[in-house]
Each structure stands twice: as structure tokens, then as C-alpha cells.
Image: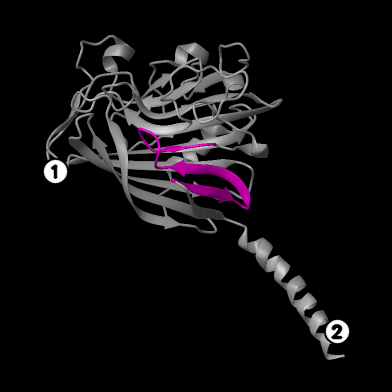
Amino acid sequence: MKSPMRHLLIGVLCLLALPVLAKDMTGVQITKGEGKLNITVDGAPFSAYHFEGAPRPYLYPLLGPNQLAMTRNWPMKDVPNEEHDHPHHRSLWFAFGSVNGVDFWSDGAKSGKTIHDKFLTVESDKKIGVIKSLNNWVSLEGKKICTDVRTIRIHSTGSEERIVDFEITLNASEGDITFGDTKEGMMALRLAETMRVKGKVAQGHIRNSEGVIDGDTWGKRAKWCDYYGPVEGKTVGVAMFDNPKNPRFPTWWHVRDYGLFAANPFGLHDFEKQPAGAGDMRIPAGGSITFRYRILLHSGDTDHAKVAEKYEAYIKETPSK
């Protein structure tokens, strides 16, 4: 009888453990992979932070409500009906086209690279997962131009909405740095092809906090911008929030009808036809500059998702970690 009783006891213990195992799947889990950190939210795949194998770190994929892929797959993966333009548009990334004259935006032969140095924090949690890292901005010749410390906070919202807070401090660690006046930057996404405003499968729309829509949003200042459209027959959107603490708030938006979606506070010459260099910003040696953005992946259009209300809630928040 000892053996059957033992088996029965083991079976009972296994059954009792199931709820615990399920509970452990809640929240944000971040695990190490090959050249990346894999991210799940409440047990469902969300994204991965790729820190090797590209000219700069990036998040890909971005899976929103109903596990729908919100960003373009190329150049990470080749799938039908996707344009192969702008290979430097990797899902979600941070970059800029002129730092001391070096292009950190493009992947050209003379472009600089943002190289991962080390992780300062990688933390899973029931509410917010955190990835904090140190990165070096290096020219083609191998000269370090500056460094950054970036903190990515992934929220467990208790719903199918996904929230990512991206905070980055760029440090003039090697001497003075100047952000040049160019439209090429900065906090950026490249969205799914069907979410585009124009294109062979495009069915999307853009709207900003000032009520400007679609192609007219390019180069305009706004507190937030929302880009939405169908993915696999369901309307979803990505909103980006500019933090009031950011330099030159509210920012200008380098948001294109072909799916590029970027906040850029420096491109005044391009956006407003001001004299060349009007958007330059210099950070003295030893100084720093910090930018904060929230990315909201939501269901429905701008009104359905209550983007304006969620922006107001966002600006009242203080990061908890």
C-alpha cells in the first residue's frame, strides 16, 4: 500500500502546485537569450531587447492586444507584403542623425554605432519589469563620442494593453557634444504595413494631441501622437507620449505616412524651414541630457483607446523604479 499512497500524495502535491505555477506567470518576466533579453507579460510573449548583432539596440517584435504584431518585421525577418526600404528602421529604437557630426541614425558606410556595454539592472516583477543598460556611441573610426544610460520599463497593465516607458540619459563623457539640426531621429518605431497611411496594403491613420491628422502631422509639435490601423482585421494603435520634462516640449514629430513614427526635438530646419543649425543643442563636457517617452499599444482608434485621457494620467505619474 505504501507505493500507491506515495503516488497519490505526489499527485495531490502536483495539483496543489498548479495554481502557484500559473500565478508565477503573472507580471513581467525578462530572461536571457542569445544576444537578447526575452520579455513576456502575464505569460504571453511581448518583445525582446536585442543588444547584439545590429548597429544599435532595439526592441522586436512588439506584440500588442490579441498578440498582434504592431511593427514591421523587415529587416529582422522577411515576410510577404512588406517594403524593404530604410533597413535601419528596426521596430522600436533610439538614434539620432547628427551627434558631433556623426550619423547614428542610418546604417551607411560612414555611420556610427551604439554599442551595448553592460546591463546595470535586469529585473522581473509583478508590476514593472526593468532593463537598464550602459551604451557607447562610437564613430566609424572607433572614437567614443558619448555614452548613454537607458532604462526601459515594461508594465503589466492587467489588460491586453501594453505600456513601455523609455528613459535615456546621454552623457557628454568624452567632451562637448552637439545634437545637430536634422530630421533624422530620434525615439522611433516602424509600424506594421497595414497600419500605414499610404502603401499597397495601408489602411491606417495618424492623429496628434492638436487634432492634426494623417500626413499633416509631419513636422508638427504635439504632446502626443497616435498611429492606428488594422492588423489581421482588428484595429489597433501605437501612441507615443512626450514627457513635459523633455527638452523643447512639446516635441516635433518625424512621423511619416509610410509607417515611420518618431519624436525629434532637434530638426527645426526641416520641420519649420528655419535657418540651418537653428535646432542645434550643445551639451558641455561632463553634462547630460535626458529624454522620457511612453509607448502605449492599444486596441481601437484614438478615441476608443482614450489616448488623451491616458496622456493626462501619464504626466501625473512618477516612475516607481
Q: Residues within 10 Å of mark 2 (few under 14, many from 20)?
A: few
> Is residue 321 among the parts visible in the rendering?
no
Q: Residues within 10 Å of mark 1 (few under 14, many from 20)?
A: few
Q: Which residue is mark 1?
A: 286
Front residue of this view, candidates 123 and 35: 35
- The span picked out in magenta is 35-61
SS label for mark 1: loop
User: Image point 54% across, 36% down: which residue?
Assistant: 61
Q: Position of residue 34 (x, y in %)?
A: 47, 48
Disc 2 and disc 1 in contact, CB within 8 angstroms: no
53 to the left or right of 180: right
Q: Is residue 308 left or right of residue 244?
A: right
In the image, residue 21 sits, relative to residue 13, either above or below, namely above
Count how many numbered circles sit on residues in the image.
Answer: 2
Give how far across and how far down residue 286 sits, in percent: 14, 43
User: Which numbered disc flags the more N-terminal residue, 2 or 1?
Assistant: 2
Mark 2 vs mark 1, foreground winner is 2
Q: Which mark is residue 270?
A: none
Q: Residue at x 19, y 30 (%)?
A: 141
What type is the residue that disc 1 sits on? Gly
As shown in the figure, which amino acid type bears the numbered disc 2? Pro
What residue did someone put label 2 on?
Answer: 4
In the rendered image, residue 76, in percent from the top left (x then y), is placed at 50, 31
Residue 221 spot, x, y in % from top left: 38, 21
Q: Is residue 37 magenta?
A: yes
Q: Secondary structure at mark 2?
A: helix
Give me the residue at 53% from left, 48% from top: 39
In the displayed structure, 2 sits above or below 33; it is below
Residue 146 is inside the magenta segment = no
Q: On the picture, is 204 further left or further right than 223?
A: right
Question: Residue at image x 41%, y 33%?
Answer: 93
